[in-house]
């Protein structure tokens, strides 16, 4: 039987609006109208009315310093009503609060959303001097410990597709790609990553939450301040953080299950 062709409809205005939102989602700094037009290969006049509409509906806003556009938390607010995210937030609230109280460090919970890492929850340390990550914060995954943990637990085919489109990976040389391959294997075997922060001094620890085999994934991250309460003892706290990550998994009604190791041939973009 001849396969029925799927209808293809094109809605120019909607496509244009989605292009703007997607472009801003991967931009590291606010974008001017001219910069957006250049990125999307359109004219400023083509985008002006759509940008104005998105700003009026609070999907984007202007930066007070640069006057460029950035995403607001409107998209996060909409996604927050999605039941899996809501369940994840409810399951993590108690364990995250207890973890912060136990180790005297702030912690946060992150998920992957398309090409970006998004922080969906955080619990603050009881210490007067602490490091916190704002809910709604977005980052390129490979530049964060939590992002690399989450990427590592995708299926091999999805990892390859992710890396093929990732800007950070495209900038890596052969040596760095080889190191990343080794790191992916280690993360999948151990379920966590201890790494130096790419944005500041100090260590970041991130542990997997959920069951990768059924696609329910989040990362429980703890950023450590150099010279802080746990200076020099960060790596000793990995089992503690893992315990609370497993508690969140248990509250979700899931069992902890790490993926098996993968070979270089499984990831065609790592050589």
Image: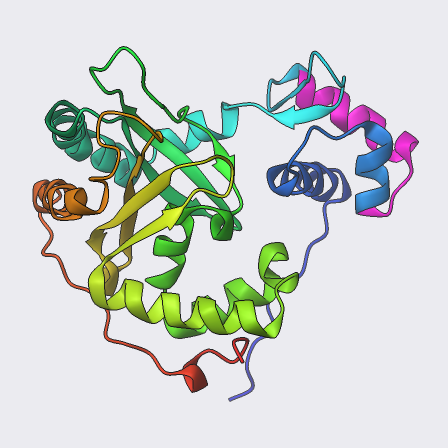
219 versus 175 height, above or below: above
Instruction: Answer whether residue 41 is magenta in the image.
Output: yes
In the displayed structure image, the side of residue 253 where residue 29 appears, left or right: right
- Residue plotted at (46% across, 78% down): 267
Residue range (magenta): 40-55
Residue 137 position in % (x across, y down): 47, 30
In the displayed structure, 166 sits above or below 13; it is below
Q: Residue at x 14, y 30 (%)?
A: 99
Nearest to the observer: residue 185 or residue 163: 185
In this view, the residue in front, 99 or 175, is: 175
Q: Is residue 220 above or below residue 225?
A: below
Query: How many numbered dots are placed on residues in this image?
Result: 0
- Predominant SS along the magenta part: helix
Q: Position of residue 86 (x, y in %)?
A: 26, 32
Along the line of sight, the residue nearer the viewer: 195 or 260:
195
Give the residue displayed 89% in from the left and 32% down from the top: 44
Q: Nearer the viewer, residue 50 or 61?
A: 61
The picture places residue 107, in percent across and down from the top left corner, at 27, 31
Q: Is residue 56 left or right of residue 151?
A: right
Q: Is residue 180 left or right of residue 9?
A: left
Q: Is residue 34 left or right of residue 241?
A: right
Q: Quadrant of residue 257?
A: bottom left
Please check the rendered image and state whether residue 25 is part of the magenta-colored stretch, yes or no.
no
């Amino acid at each position: 039987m001849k396969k029925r062709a799927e209808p293809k409809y094109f809605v120019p205005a909607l496509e244009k609006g989605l292009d703007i939102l997607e472009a801003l989602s991967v931009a590291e700094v606010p974008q001017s109208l001219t910069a957006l037009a250049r990125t999307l290969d359109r004219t400023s006049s083509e985008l002006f009315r759509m940008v104005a509409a998105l700003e009026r509906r609070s999907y984007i806003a202007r930066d007070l310093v640069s006057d460029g556009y950035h995403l607001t938390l409107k998209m996060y607010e909409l996604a927050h009503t999605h039941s899996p995210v809501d369940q994840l937030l409810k399951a993590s609230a108690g364990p995250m609060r207890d973890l912060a109280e136990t180790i005297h460090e702030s912690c946060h919970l992150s998920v992957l959303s398309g090409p970006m890492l998004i922080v969906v929850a955080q619990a603050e340390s009881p210490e007067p001097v602490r490091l916190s990550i704002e809910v709604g914060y977005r980052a390129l995954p490979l530049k964060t410990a939590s992002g690399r943990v989450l990427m590592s637990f995708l299926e091999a085919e999805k990892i390859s597709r992710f890396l093929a489109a990732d800007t950070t990976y495209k900038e890596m040389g052969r040596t760095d790609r080889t190191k990343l391959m080794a790191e992916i294997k280690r993360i999948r075997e151990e379920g966590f990553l201890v790494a130096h922060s790419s944005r500041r001094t100090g260590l970041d620890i991130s542990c997997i939450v959920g069951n990768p085999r059924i696609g329910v994934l989040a990362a429980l991250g703890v950023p450590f301040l150099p010279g802080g309460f746990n200076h020099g003892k960060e790596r000793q706290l990995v089992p503690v953080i893992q315990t609370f990550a497993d508690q969140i998994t248990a509250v979700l009604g899931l069992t902890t299950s790490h993926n098996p190791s993968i070979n270089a041939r499984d990831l065609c973009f790592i050589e």
